[in-house]
Amino acid sequence: MEYLVVQSKHHRSQFSTRHHLNRGTHICYVKNDIGTGHSIPIYVTITGDVPIVFVGDRNYSIGYGDEITLFCNITSDPPANNVYWEKVVHGTKNILNNWTVGIQGVSVDTPSLTIMESTTADIGTYRCVAINDVGTGYSETILLDVFGELPTVTIAADLLEIKYGETLQIVCVINAKPPPTKVYWEKVSNGITKVISNGTSGTDGITIDNPSITLLHATDSDSGFYKCFAVNEFGMGYSSPTKLTVIGGLPEVSVPYMTYLTGTGYTIALTCVINNAFPAVSKVYWERYISGSTTIISSASIGLKGVTVEEPSLIIPSATEMMSGEYTCFAVNSVGTGSSLPVQLTVQAGFTQKAPIKEYAEKQDHSPAGIIIVAVSAASTVGTIGLFVIACLKYRLTRRTGKKDMTTANNIRLEQNDSSTNSLQHSGSQIEKED
């Protein structure tokens, strides 16, 4: 600070030259018991002024992450000895100097403010401030805006397949300025949307640093359409959906026919078909439901065949009326147990075949031990006129010593003790009948 000193023989006065109020004529007065004396007028002139601070553009707009310099020029006499910037956001003032992190400049030699990597936190109103010995000068205000874009999100694969129990990563790539603040996934299956985020059971990843999703142990419930989502300060972006199919799960067990009809003593096979057998099927069994009682049938059941992983169908070598009932096929793997729809087996004591043929005799001699399968869809119970045959008829070939008496399924009759008669007609199947 500079001072002007006025000194006489008996008095000394000191004035600061920093203040314009000290300019002008000054007279020194001294008072004692006799009276008041004064000096001759002194004329004080102070040269210089507060700094003149100039900024160029009043409005700046910059992309997120880009570098920007807010221009500031200072004219000062006496020279400026301090420079800083003020930033006002929502009425709150912040001081920026050359020690502030993320900026450069803001010095007496380089008063302009350079923001190295702009963010939305840099949005606000700025002004440049300079100080000299006379006082403080301020620039006009500058408005800075930072703009960005919604995240761009892509999934690396469009169609994915995985086996049950395996681990799979669905890669998500995010390009975003500003960076995302939140990442999550959505899975749509059968019209139901499930949100999957970091920490969801059975998954890994789904973070800002690693947005990809990892399915640790895929199950059939993981099948569906997946989308990756990312959110930043400007909004939300998401990928196109990708379809994931998990191969395997519970065994798919089906039966081709819902109703079977045979006679006593004949062999009949209740067909069971197992699909989607991954993991591999380890066990097959059947359940028979008769008159409120359920019986489990396995490959070890006496008098029955099949019921294995290789041959899941239930083969009854010699049917009896007591075997009539409702049958269901089951298949077991490491995931669980799958079951078929129930089928109805009817065994009738009066079921006989009468229709001699000649043309198929030679063919029947070379046929394997035959199996009777009569699969029918009944409009009413057995005994009602008009049974409709929906499947082929294979009839057991039996032999007796001596001549063979052959009949054909071209004319098969159900003979009953009462007056009603039901006829089944089907071409191309043969039967050898025991008398």
Image (cartoon, rainbow, N blue to C red):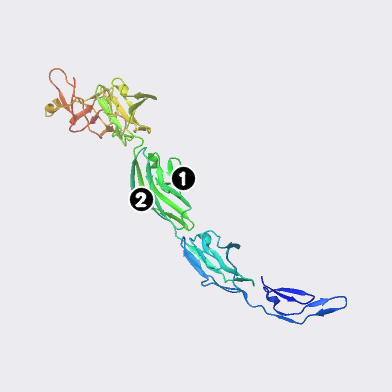
Q: Is residue 223 visible?
A: no
SS assignment at label 2: loop
**x and y percentages locating residue 248 in the rendered image:** 34, 37
Residue at 53% of width from left, 63% of height from top? 123
For the point 15% across and 22% down, which residue is it? Answer: 405
> Does label 2 or label 1 sit earlier along the sequence?
2
Q: Position of residue 259 (x, y in %)?
A: 30, 31
Compared to residue 19, the image places residue 257 above or below, namely above
Which amino acid lies under the numbered mark 2 shown in the image of this protein? Answer: Ala
**Quadrant of image for the N terminus:** bottom right
Q: Which mark is residue 1?
A: none
* Location of residue 403 with respect to 218 vertically, above or below: above
State the residue lying farthest toward the right: 34
Q: Is residue 153 above or below residue 399?
A: below
Residue 125 appears anywhere in the view: yes
Query: Label 1 is placed on what type of residue?
Result: Asn
Q: Position of residue 398 (x, y in %)?
A: 18, 22
The residue where tag 1 is placed is 198
- Categorize mark 2 by other alpha carbons within 10 Å: few (<14), some (14-19), many (20+): few
Q: Residues within 10 Å of mark 1 (few under 14, many from 20)?
A: some
Rendered image quadrant of residue 26: bottom right
Closer-to-camera residue (275/402): 275
- State the residue lying farthest toward the top: 401
What kind of element bears circle 1?
loop
Indicate whether 424 appears above or below 319. Answer: below
Identify the residue position indicated by label 2 in the image: 156
Say which of 73 and 385 sits in front: 73
Q: Position of residue 89 (x, y in %)?
A: 57, 62
For residue 333, side relative to residue 204 (left or right)? left
